[in-house]
Amino acid sequence: MRVAIVGIGLIGGSMALALKENGFADWVIGVDANPEHQNLALELKLVDEIVPLNEAVKKSDFIILAIPVNAAEKLLPGLLDQVHLQVLMDVGSTKEGLLKCIQHHPKRGRFVATHPMWGTENSGPTAAVAGAFLDKATVICNKEETDGDALDLVEKMYETLGMHLVYMNAKAHDVHVAYVSHISHITSFALANTVLEKERGEDNIFELASGGFESTVRLAKSNSDMWVPIFMQNKENVLDVLNEHISQLRKFKSCLEKENFEYLKELIEQANGIKRILK
Amino acid sequence: MRVAIVGIGLIGGSMALALKENGFADWVIGVDANPEHQNLALELKLVDEIVPLNEAVKKSDFIILAIPVNAAEKLLPGLLDQVHLQVLMDVGSTKEGLLKCIQHHPKRGRFVATHPMWGTENSGPTAAVAGAFLDKATVICNKEETDGDALDLVEKMYETLGMHLVYMNAKAHDVHVAYVSHISHITSFALANTVLEKERGEDNIFELASGGFESTVRLAKSNSDMWVPIFMQNKENVLDVLNEHISQLRKFKSCLEKENFEYLKELIEQANGIKRILK
């Protein structure tokens, strides 16, 4: 199968690697607006060739959109115009707005909205990782709006990656990811800014930073070109979670101010409940 | 050398393992108030024997206090009363209050205040890890208040663990750790409570959680018996950082509310500055 990957970055590059390795793709066609990324994608053998987008659509059986969610929203309707029997899917972190854009498109059925739940704080072709998706979940949204053969192909592809499939409507997806992904990025960005602000006044503040700090702050390396559009598109849900999070932090603040250490202990023990979820 | 370790948990247990393995300790004497931990420490061969605290002080050359910081503050003056030529050190996460307690103690010089910058979210003897401290930093506070031979011994011990030494006064230490350790724990606890609160209303919210979420929330598993006393003792510094952190989060909130996506991009790019610090 000839697979076109639009956007050879962290996700697109990792998918390219995996689909060539497992034989799902005989030939991987890369599309990328950034000439430096084009060269890197060829050098790193993530793709077999680089061609312009329109040519890629014509030459391929299966097209994977792996670009920032605002770019996907812009491109998707025009891409669907060009598609005949091909299957088109995305891998973006927000879904409601994207699916609204093509709700009434005559080719809506050729598109499958997906979100593989894997990522790192790195970006670009050099961030691609072999075996990235194994044993992770992938979400497929609004499957009833897609053609049966298109859904079958995407499901088969994700199964070759070793992912398990979760079905959800776009609205529920966007709420869920606000809680299990988007808020983590905001807290990391804000934590990085908190300590970087302090660093200006103090030398060597990071000499003492160890694994715990690194763990909570590593997502702050994430790329703004990817994340600003995600926050824009999922604004309402992210604001809901952010308000809840600030109110949880205020409980800690109030415990300290009032020296209410019994309630502080309760809050921590409540947080320990996360052990039920994390292995 | 006969080393007594008071508190055979995450830090004490890991230190016991390392000091036996590298030959610094010929005999490790364990002290622990929890009978279950006493048995585990013997079963896991973290210690050679378990004895009561007073007996341990008499029998050992070097005593390591690895108990919660409030317990250390209570025990330390009485322990110093019993010490003659022995060296006593702690490994706690706060220093200013502890050192004030023994400021005028005639045996002050026998005590070395230290803080090895390593830990995990786990606790108890089963949490002990071999090779835990290698290549990490350890802080020694107010070294000018300790006897030369006591300081030498502690420095030598940390060098056998492969740690590099950082010297700092207690006040500066407590500010630094508020930024690079204590706030990370508060954000993790609060984030866990944010999503656990949501989970009550929604099924399977965690089905989609992946590495990024786990990374920012794993410290929320940390033990309240250890962390409440740390927050109590470092209240003022933690409150300063927490206020700064909440105000950083409010900037993100305001960007979303006002749809000021240019400033949101700036905030994220500023947070990316953490790349300078994290490898």
Image (cartoon, coloured by chain):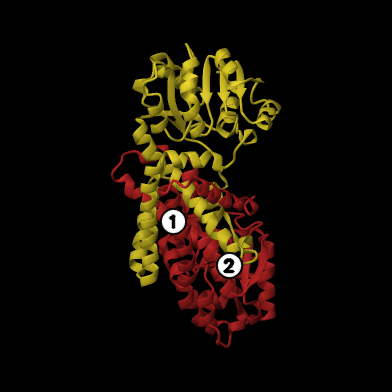
Chain colours: A red, B yellow
Label at residue A250: 1
Above/below status of A60 relative to B40: below
Label at residue A184: none
Q: Which chain letter matches label 1? A: A
Q: CA distance from mark 1 to mark 2?
A: 33 Å
Task: Determine the residue located farthest toward the top in the rendered image.
Answer: B85
Q: Nearer the viewer, residue B80 or B193?
A: B80
Query: Quadrant of the image for the N terminus of chain A?
Result: bottom right
**What's the amino acid at mark 1?**
Arg
Q: Nearer the viewer, residue A158 or A233?
A: A233
Between disc 1 and disc 2, the foreground one is 1
Do discs 1 and 2 share a chain?
Answer: yes
Q: Which chain letter matches label 2? A: A
Task: Determine the residue located farthest toward the left in the rendered image.
Answer: A201
Q: Quadrant of residue B94?
A: top left
Residues packed near mark 2 inside 10 Å, few (<14), some (14 to 19) or many (20 plus) = many
**What's the amino acid at mark 2?**
His
**Residue B19 location (% of width, % of height):** 57, 22
Above/below status of A233 relative to B131: below
The first of marks 1 and 2 along the sequence is 2
Above/below status of B133 relative to B26: below
Q: How many marks?
A: 2
Q: Nearer the viewer, residue A35 or B125?
A: B125
Q: Is residue A193 visible?
A: no
**Residue A250 location (% of width, % of height):** 44, 56
- Determine which residue is flagged by label 2: A115
**Residue A39 location (% of width, % of height):** 45, 60
Q: Quadrant of residue A164?
A: bottom right
